[in-house]
Each structure stands twice: as structure tokens, then as C-alpha cells.
Image: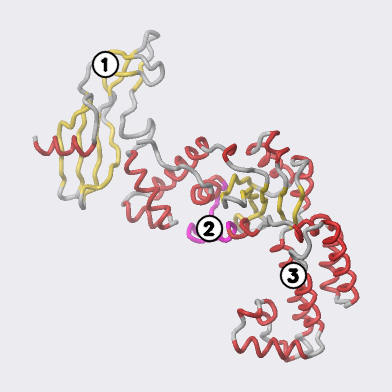
């Protein structure tokens, strides 16, 4: 009897429920707590009427938190009620959701462990349950968190939109994020116009779309055309990260071309692309030797550095535009074909590049999120289904209220 009372206290059930038996199996190291509904009436989950107990459903088990080294389950024949229309309904137990086979407390512990490990397989091993149980809890808690979230509580004046590779081949997802909070707002499969339109329409009301002041993004045509239509009052900002990445790629192409005829350029990739303050002593010596020589890659490096110096010099749009035009002209005069290709691309998007020079809101947070999403992807060894990928992104980086109600 003491054991029954002890588990009654631990489960903290109301007076309608009572622990009737506790069975310990020492071979399987499992404990089964048998619970019975002892009242004569119950509240119907659909009509919310207090109705007499009609009968009981077949016995059902729920996985609960472990008791010491023993796996623990709650077992119960849930009561059913019959309404005036003759419909029979099973009542929902206080320890679990309607269709689940684990308790709220078990789910709470799984969420805590997932947030700590960021790994579904490890979480399943520690909790001694199947991977499918962990995966289902991620979907459930993400869906619950998304239903609770109120975007009206966020200042949606500044947004970022970016792509993330999904699986092998040209498979991408589009990620809409909020740079001020660092949260992912939502994710959509693909990166074409249709996917971008769907993402913006399902996450933002017309009023919210009209209130966006800046949207930072890469020079992807689908993003530019859709955001111009859907976010009519937003300035498009081509973020600093992507702009400099284009120049870095061009520098490396120049280096690979010149290394064929200049032995000194061998093993110089990181010496040219890393920040000078981050160079090792060996890389610094290599870098200084290259800078003193008359290589095109040296001039390409200087073009990139000149571009980086343009950021935050001017906050006035016209002045920043004039600086950009001067940099373009001076850079084209160097006549480096790989660099010229990037500069001509910048010329096609002068407004977005100019906005990048004067804007304090960039895709820097989106790029950090991109790195965090990559960590999740590696831990999960890739994702075959978009629904799974979307759920884990929002679970870990959506800023959601994930936990079940107590």
C-alpha cells in the first residue's frame, strides 16, 4: 500500500485517479504503474459535459520517466463516455496527450536532452527508446511551438532570406529569419519564385509584409523579384558576406590561373583569403612575398580590400553610391578578367550593393544560422524528407515554446 501511495504522490494525479498496482519485472528492468479512474462521471473531451462512465477502453501503456535504472510505464484502461447523440468518446488522461504513447514528463525530458545534445540518435540512446519516438516528439513540439508563436511580438521591419542546401544535388530550402532575435521564422522547400512566395505568404500577413523596411539576401533572382512584389516598402540589401565571398572566389580563380606559371603561388590559398591578423607565421611570410611581386592575384586581393573599406564610411545613399562607382571604375582599370566578371555582376545590382554599404542590417545573423543548421544536418547525417529538416531547424532555432503543458 505504501508503494501505491508513493507513486500516487509522484504522479500527482487528482482524486479521480488512483494507483492500484505497481509491478516490477527484474528480468526486463521495467516497472508498470497501473492506474484506475475511480469516479463515476467524467468530462467529455468534445462537448465538455460531465457524463456518466459508459465503459472502459482496452488497456493502454505510456512510457514515463525512468524509476532508478528501471524503465517505467503507466498502464490504464481509460474510461469512455456516451453523449446524447450516442457517440462514445475516450477521455484524455492528465499525464499524456490524446494520441501519444509517452507522458508529458517524458516528452519534457526528451526536449531538454535534445536541446543539450542536438542529436536525435544520442537522445534515443540515453532515453532508451526508439529513434522514431524522438523524431515524433520533435515534430509534435515544433508544431505546438509554431501554433503558440505570435509574430506580432517581433519587430518585423528587418528580415533576412537565405538558401540552405538540403541534400545531394541541387536541392535547397529557403530560410526566412529575423536578424534582431536570431530566430528562424520559417522554412520552405526549394528556392524558386513559387517557394519564396509561399514562404512569405504563409508567415506574414499583408500588413506585416507592407511594414518590412529592409530585406537582406543574396543576388538570387527569385528572391529579388518576389520580395520586390511582396515587400513593396522594403529596401533590398545584398549582404556583405555574399558580396565578399564573390570576390574571394574570384581571387582564388586568379591564383589558380597564375600558379601554373608561378611556383611561388603554390599553397597560397589561405594566405590570400584569410584575414591578415589570422595568418600563421608561415602564411604571413608567403603573403608578404606575393604582395611584393607583380602578380594579378596581388592586385585582385587589393581590389577586395578596397571594397571592404567602403562599408560604413558613408550613411548617405548618394555618397555611398558615388564611392561604389569610383571603386568599380578603378577596379575595372586593373583589367583582371575573373574580378571583372564579379564587378559587372555588382553593376547590375547597384542599388542592393549600395544599400549594403550603408545598412546596419545584413545577413550576418542568417549566415550564423546557416552554420548552425549545417551542424544539425551533419549530426543528423543528412535529411531525406523536407518535413524532418524543417522541423529540426525550427525546433532548435525557431525560438519556440516547445514544452507540453503541465
Task: Locate the C terminus and report the quarter of the image it occupies.
Answer: top left
What mark, if any, has residue 377 been given in the picture? 2
Task: Locate the N terminus and report the quarter of the image it occupies.
Answer: top left
First reached walking from the N terminus: tag 2 or tag 3: 3
Residue 217: quadrant of the picture: bottom right
What mark, if any, has residue 231 been given in the picture? none
Q: Secondary structure at mark 1?
A: strand
Q: Which residues are magenta?
A: 369-386
Label 1: few (<14), some (14–19) or many (≥20) C-alpha neighbours in 10 Å: some
What's the CA distance linking mark 2 and mark 3?
31 Å
Which residue appears at 18% of the width and 38% of the height? 7
What's the CA distance linking mark 1 and mark 3?
73 Å
Label 3, on which residue? Answer: 308
Point out residue 44 in the picture as x, y percentages from the top left corner.
35, 18
Which residue appears at 28% of the width and 36% of the height? 61
Point out residue 310 in the picture as x, y percentages from the top left corner.
78, 67
Residue 64: quadrant of the picture: top left
Magenta span contains residue 230: no
Q: Secondary structure at mark 3?
A: helix
Q: Are marks 2 and 3 in contact (CB under 8 Å)?
A: no
Which residue appears at 66% of the width and 54% of the height? 163
Point out residue 388 in the picture as x, y percentages from the top left corner.
52, 47
**Does residue 230 appear to the left or right of 63 in the view shown?**
right
Magenta span contains residue 385: yes
In terms of depth relative to the viewer, which is nearer, 126 or 298? 298
Point out residue 391 in the picture as x, y percentages from the top left corner.
52, 46
- In this rendering, which labeled residue sits more in front, label 1 or label 2? 1
Q: Are marks 1 and 2 in contact (CB under 8 Å)?
A: no
Label 1, on which residue? Answer: 41
First reached walking from the N terminus: tag 1 or tag 3: 1
Q: Relative to 18, is 103 above or below?
A: below
**Does residue 378 appear to the left or right of 297 in the view shown?**
left
Amino acid at each position: 500500500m505504501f508503494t501505491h501511495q508513493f507513486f500516487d504522490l509522484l504522479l500527482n494525479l487528482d482524486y479521480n485517479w488512483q494507483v492500484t498496482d505497481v509491478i516490477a519485472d527484474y528480468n526486463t528492468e521495467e516497472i508498470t504503474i497501473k492506474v484506475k479512474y475511480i469516479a463515476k462521471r467524467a468530462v467529455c473531451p468534445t462537448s465538455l459535459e460531465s457524463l456518466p462512465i459508459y465503459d472502459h477502453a482496452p488497456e493502454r501503456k505510456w512510457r514515463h520517466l525512468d524509476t532508478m535504472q528501471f524503465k517505467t510505464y503507466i498502464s490504464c484502461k481509460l474510461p469512455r463516455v456516451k453523449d446524447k447523440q450516442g457517440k462514445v468518446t475516450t477521455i484524455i488522461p492528465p499525464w499524456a496527450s490524446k494520441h501519444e504513447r509517452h507522458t508529458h514528463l517524458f516528452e519534457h525530458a526528451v526536449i531538454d536532452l535534445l536541446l543539450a545534445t542536438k542529436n536525435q540518435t544520442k537522445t534515443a540512446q540515453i532515453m532508451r527508446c526508439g529513434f522514431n519516438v524522438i523524431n515524433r516528439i520533435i515534430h509534435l513540439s515544433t508544431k505546438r511551438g509554431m501554433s503558440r508563436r505570435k509574430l506580432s511580438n517581433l519587430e518585423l521591419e528587418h528580415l533576412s532570406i537565405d538558401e540552405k542546401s538540403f541534400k545531394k544535388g541541387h536541392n535547397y530550402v529557403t530560410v526566412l529569419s529575423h536578424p534582431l532575435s536570431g530566430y528562424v521564422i520559417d522554412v520552405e522547400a526549394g528556392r524558386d519564385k513559387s517557394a519564396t512566395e509561399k514562404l512569405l505568404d504563409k508567415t506574414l500577413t499583408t500588413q506585416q509584409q507592407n511594414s518590412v523596411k529592409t530585406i537582406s539576401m543574396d543576388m538570387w533572382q527569385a528572391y529579388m523579384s518576389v520580395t520586390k512584389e511582396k515587400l513593396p516598402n522594403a529596401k533590398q540589401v545584398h549582404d556583405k558576406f555574399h558580396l565578399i565571398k564573390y570576390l574571394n572566389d574570384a581571387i582564388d580563380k586568379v591564383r589558380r590561373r597564375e600558379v601554373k606559371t608561378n611556383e611561388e603561388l603554390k599553397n597560397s590559398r589561405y594566405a590570400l583569403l584569410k584575414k591578415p591578423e589570422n595568418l600563421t607565421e608561415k602564411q604571413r611570410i608567403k603573403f608578404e612575398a606575393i604582395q611584393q611581386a607583380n602578380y594579378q592575384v596581388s592586385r585582385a586581393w587589393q581590389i577586395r580590400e578596397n571594397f571592404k573599406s567602403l562599408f560604413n564610411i558613408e550613411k548617405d545613399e548618394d555618397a555611398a553610391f558615388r564611392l561604389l562607382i569610383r571603386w568599380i571604375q578603378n577596379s575595372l582599370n586593373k583589367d583582371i578578367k575573373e574580378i571583372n566578371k564579379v564587378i559587372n555582376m555588382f553593376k547590375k545590382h547597384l542599388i542592393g550593393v549600395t544599400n549594403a554599404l550603408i545598412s546596419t542590417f545584413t545577413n550576418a545573423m542568417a549566415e550564423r544560422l546557416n552554420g548552425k543548421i549545417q551542424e544539425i544536418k551533419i549530426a543528423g547525417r543528412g535529411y531525406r524528407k523536407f518535413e524532418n529538416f524543417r522541423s529540426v531547424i525550427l525546433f532548435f532555432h525557431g525560438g519556440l515554446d516547445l514544452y507540453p503543458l503541465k
